[in-house]
Image: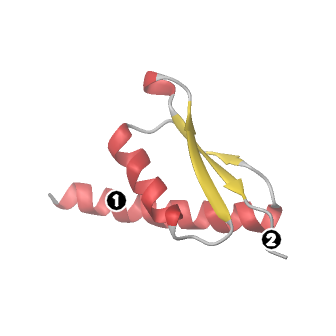
Amino acid sequence: DRWRERRERALTKQAEQLGAECVKRAKVIVMEPLPPRERRVVHMALARFPGVTTQSEGDGEERRIKIIPMPAPR
């Protein structure tokens, strides 16, 4: 449906902005808790984003994504 498509686009955009901030500041960023479907959207968006990796942490309703900067290649 349209709402879900808009939500996925907004999450992808937010993920990319946070990914860029994570790389720039070289700091881990922890997102707000998200439902499983939305966490998957964020993980997929950042899977192709250079310089970061993602990881989910927490349990149940409090599960959230950590965006982690990767060391620069030598």
Residue at 56% of width from left, 27% of height from top?
58
* Element on which disc 2 rests: loop
* Left or right: 23, with 18 as reference point: right
Q: Residue furthest left?
A: 1
* Left or right: 11, with 67 as reference point: left
In the rendered structure, find residue 32 and report the number of the disc placed on it.
none
- Which of the two residues, 43 or 30, is positioned nearer the viewer here? 43
**Spot occupied by residue 14 in the image (x, y as percentages of width and height):** 52, 61
Tell me which corner region of the image, top left, top right, bottom left or bottom right, holds residue 11: bottom left
Residue at 85% of width from left, 76% of height from top?
74
Q: As shown in the figure, which amino acid type bears the numbered disc 1? A: Glu
Q: As shown in the figure, which amino acid type bears the numbered disc 2? A: Ala
Residue at 18% of width from left, 61% of height from top?
2
70, above or below 48, in the image: above
Residue at 33% of width from left, 45% of height from top?
37
Looking at the picture, the colour scheme in use is: secondary structure
**Spot occupied by residue 50 in the image (x, y as percentages of width and height):** 63, 72
Label 2 crowding class (10 Å Cα cut-off): few <14, some 14-19, many 20+? few
Badge 1 is on which residue?
8
The N terminus, quarter of image: bottom left
Q: Residue furthest front?
A: 74
* Residue 32 visible somewhere in the drawing: no
Query: Disc 2, disc 1: CB below 8 Å?
Result: no
Badge 2 is on which residue?
72
